[in-house]
Amino acid sequence: MARLEYDELVQLLQDGQIGHLRFMLESDSAESYLEWCEQHGIEPSDESAEFYYDETEIDMMERQLIDDENYGIWN
């Protein structure tokens, strides 16, 4: 099976065709998600994948706001 692009995975998730676990395992974040699960002593599941996704999305959005050129901060 061909690897899906991130936008395709997001669309499948939003359409309810896949769950958060499959979304995370097929995304570029699969390795970091699995490491996070191991560090926290939890099994990969739809619930933990949804939590991880939500937390990392919030973190990325906050970084985008901070890195915005209007703030004058560049990394």
Image (cartoon, rainbow, N blue to C red):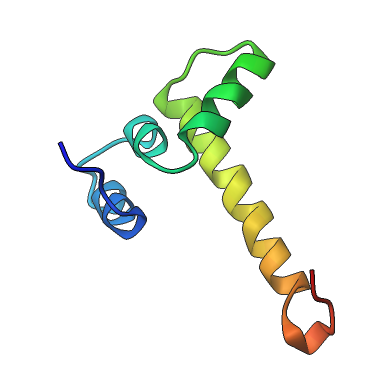
Q: Quadrant of residue 55?
A: top right
Q: Which quadrant does the C terminus fall into?
A: bottom right
Residue at figure coordinates x 57%, y 32% from the top left: 32
Instruction: Reply above or below: 5 against 37.
Output: below
Residue at figure coordinates x 38%, y 32% from the top left: 25
Instruction: Reply above or below: 30 against 58.
Output: above
Q: Toward the viewer: 32 or 10?
A: 32
Residue at figure coordinates x 50%, y 40% from the top left: 29
Q: Toward the viewer: 15 or 38?
A: 38
Instruction: Reply above or below: 7 against 29.
Output: below
Give the residue at the far bottom of this rendering: 70
In the rendered structure, the answer to whether residue 34 lies left or right of residue 74 reads left
Instruction: Reply above or below: 71 against 10.
Output: below
In the rendered structure, the answer to whether residue 3 lies left or right of residue 63 reads left
In the rendered structure, the answer to whether residue 64 lies left or right of residue 44 reads right
- Residue 43, given in percent of the width and then of the height, sits at 50, 13
- Residue 9, given in percent of the width and then of the height, sits at 30, 49
